[in-house]
Amino acid sequence: MSETLSANDAIATFTVCADAALNGLIEQLPERLQGVAFAGEFQHYISTGQRPQFPQSVRKAPGCVAWIDFDQDQEAALETAEVLHRMSAPTVTCVGVASQVETSLLLRAMRHGCSEFHQKPVTIEHLKETVERIKSRIFVQMESSAPRGRIVSFFGAKGGVGTTTLAVHIAAYLAKQHGKKTLLVDHNHQLGHVGLLLGLEDSNYHFDDLTRNVDRLDAELLSGFLIRHASGLAVLSSPSTCSVRYHAMPEDLERIFEFLRQEFDFVVIDSSLQYDDAPAMIQYSDSVYLVSTPDVAALRDLSRHIEHLGLTEVPADKLRVAINRSASQDAIGQEQIEKVVKFPVSVSIPNNYGELLRAVNAGEPIWPQRRSEFTSRLTRWAHQLAGEHDGPSALSQHAPRKRFSFWKTEKVQE
Ligand SMILES: Nc1ncnc2c1ncn2[C@@H]1O[C@H](COP(=O)(O)OP(=O)(O)OP(=O)(O)O)[C@@H](O)[C@H]1O
Ligand SMILES: [Mg+2]
């Protein structure tokens, strides 16, 4: 299992073959600099054949800084830098230190993986600046490589086209079939049907509780607002009574979504274009599905919405059209729909009225095990979304981590 790293963990520093003065200074660093821990010292150089056994503090750190003293043996120090630099767990930034620093040594050290090089004697201020610089680089890298949750929102071209049905099924499939940490938000200001379709009890907490508490939002508070479906899906339901409409500020929505992205792989939103905050919802979503049925009234509205969203500069690549109940009798065909709305159809879900009626009454989605064209289209759709979240590097992420054979160094602290 991969180890979870967080920006709250301290950067680990350790020394390799350092003299007493250098060791003493590195040991003092944590007193002078927050977020830095001293992991210990290696008394031998590291080579491909003799790799160190790293303690937990090093393996779990978001990043490490190795101070390699070159004075005992330059060649062995260079090999140490190379071995450490190539490691991926933990990620090690190598800093060389030597009494004599010539240009040729500097260049070789850089080529072997040293990011910085210092001439002795070094001062604590000097070391502090170096670690601060490396630390900020590590965190920038962590932020840009951290997987971010995707916001997928659903809007009906008009009422009753099946927006909630599709949002519920996609969210449930992502959670159950793909094991994605998924939140389904019923953004209806009142009387939404998400809870009903999933057979959930009424909740006292709704989307507007997030907006009201935006300043103190954290994982614990959020979990108190959510209801869990047996599939693992987390749900933020809509009020089951007639309620006053609330108004969310776009900047609050942005903060909420940024927060939710960190907590979930997917946030699926069942929303409505009628709401004032729909433009902001669309802006912060990664994918926006416009749901329509293949009939003249819904398609007229769909084409107007697409025109309007185009004018409001919503990037076309996040907009997707989903045609629901596509196989119903007398329905307009996909080619004709694309001509009328001047937009490609991404998803087409067939009519499945009888089964859906039973599913709603039972308060349970229709799962893929119930083989039909309806479930196989939904399965493909969820599969495609899950793939977008995993990204092109999914394969390498899921590959087992390389294990090193280690040797122990007594002085490294656990
Ligand atoms: N593919 C489908 N085949 C047959 N019936 C469907 C299909 N999708 C949805 N329905 C049915 O259409 C009706 C409306 O569905 P749903 O509540 O999901 O629509 P909606 O667009 O969310 O409506 P609203 O605008 O009221 O929020 C429900 O009875 C539902 O079971
Ligand atoms: Mg609905």
Image (cartoon, rainbow, N blue to C red):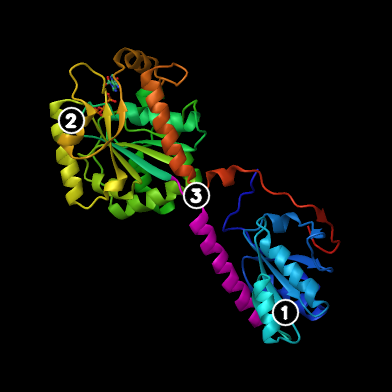
Viewer-proximal residue, 252 or 162? 162
For the residues labelled 2 and 3, the Cα–Cα distance comes to 39 Å
Note whether 206 is above or below 54 in the view shown. above
What residue is shown at x 17% (from left), y 37% (from top)? 341
What residue is shown at x 50% (from left), y 44% (from top)? 220
What residue is shown at x 49% (from left), y 47% (from top)? 392
For the residues labelled 3 and 1, the Cα–Cα distance comes to 36 Å
Q: Which mark is residue 147?
A: 3
Q: Tell me if label 2 and label 3 are in contact, CB under 8 Å.
A: no
What range of the chain is rendered magenta? 124-149
Labels 3 and 1: the sequence-earlier one: 1
Residue to which mark 1 is pinned: 97
Q: Residues within 10 Å of mark 3 (few under 14, many from 20)?
A: some
Labels 2 and 3: the sequence-earlier one: 3
Q: Which mark is residue 336?
A: 2
Rendering coords of residue 251 (x, y %): 31, 55
Q: Quadrant of the N terminus?
A: top right
